[in-house]
């Protein structure tokens, strides 16, 4: 059967991955309003490296027939992420951050396909940018509330300043996907790559889970210690 809409293939072909991503602990706690600043700034740092890789490869291949129609500079996130990083880490932010192990694997994958099969970059652009445009407004509100951010800083990542209407833009992006000159085989490979991209994102979120778990364990260990110390001093006083 001939494939006629890459946009539909991508949406349908990643539905399962999408619900799996929604169920990662970190993503679930984020949605539930549990966001600690330390994990969040780590996420922003990891995303900075991911978007540097995506945007570098898209720029390199911006005249490739499969990339040019979906090359929209108004989607670029590198600058907004660096503004958030200045807020969370201070002026020396660049020397204070490094990609996590899962992030390294993610960015290696992006550069690798950039060299070997640039049309697969479409999958990485789709997974991140359409996801950001879909959930950004809600996530911004949750992040600001949970971390008690008072001024306008710390959530620039969610502001697509050159995009006035997210829904109209998403439709434009989806129509552009459908104009890409691709064979059925290439469409299948792009959908498969989008699932890989979801998976790489999940791995990145799962690491943040681990640090949330670490925080919880530390808090528990601290309160046990305090409790024991209190018990000892009560016994000594008796
Ligand atoms: C709990 C977390 C999430 C929720 C509640 C959520 C919710 C949604 C919703 C409601 C849409 C549909 C928007 C529309 O049709 O206009 C959407 C689309 C999308 N989301 Fe998510 N999302 C979550 C996490 C993620 C993650 C982690 C990713 C990838 C890293 C992602 C990638 C996408 C993409 C690519 C689309 C566009 C689908 C398409 O139109 O083809 N989402 N999301």
Image: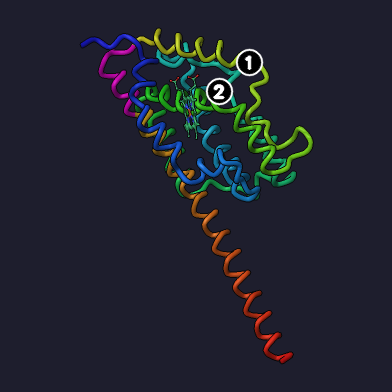
Determine whether the beta carbon of the residue marked 2 sits less than 8 angstroms from the nearest atom of ligand 1: yes
Residue underneath mark 2: 133
- Report the magenta residues as a range: 182-192
Callouts 1 and 2 close, C-beta under 8 Å: yes
Residue at left offset 55%, top offset 23%: 133
Determine whether the beta carbon of the residue marked 1 sits less than 8 angstroms from the nearest atom of ligand 1: no
Q: CA distance from mark 1 to mark 2?
A: 10 Å
Q: Is residue 156 above or below residue 218?
A: above
Q: Secondary structure at mark 2?
A: helix
Mark 1 or mark 2: which comes first in sequence? 2
User: Is residue 44 on the magenta stretch?
Assistant: no
Q: Position of residue 199 (x, y in %)?
A: 39, 38
**Quadrant hosting residue 236:** bottom right
Q: Tell me: 138 left or right of 182.
A: right
Residue at left offset 36%, top offset 34%: 196
Residue at left offset 32%, top offset 13%: 182
Residue underneath mark 1: 163
């Amino acid at each position: 059967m001939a494939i006629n809409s890459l946009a539909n293939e991508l949406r349908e072909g990643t539905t399962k991955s999408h619900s799996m991503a929604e169920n990662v602990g970190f993503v679930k706690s984020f949605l539930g309003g549990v966001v600690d600043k330390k994990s969040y700034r780590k996420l922003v740092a990891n995303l900075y490296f991911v978007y540097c890789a995506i945007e570098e490869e898209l720029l390199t291949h911006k005249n490739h027939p499969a990339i040019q129609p979906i090359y929209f500079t108004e989607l670029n996130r590198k600058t907004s992420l660096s503004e958030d990083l200045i807020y969370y880490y201070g002026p020396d932010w660049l020397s204070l951050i490094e990609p996590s192990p899962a992030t390294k694997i993610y960015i290696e994958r992006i550069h690798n396909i950039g060299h070997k099969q640039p049309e697969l970059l479409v999958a990485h652009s789709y997974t991140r940018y359409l996801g950001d445009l879909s959930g950004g407004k809600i996530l911004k509100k949750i992040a600001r509330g949970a971390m008690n951010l008072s001024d306008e800083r710390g959530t620039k990542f969610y502001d697509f300043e050159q995009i006035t209407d997210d829904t109209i833009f998403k439709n434009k992006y989806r129509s552009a996907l459908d104009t890409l000159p691709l064979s059925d085989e290439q469409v299948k490979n792009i959908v498969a790559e989008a699932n890989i991209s979801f998976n790489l994102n999940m791995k990145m979120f799962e690491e943040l889970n681990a640090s949330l778990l670490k925080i919880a364990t530390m808090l528990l260990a601290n309160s046990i210690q305090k409790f024991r110390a209190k018990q000892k001093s009560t016994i000594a006083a008796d």
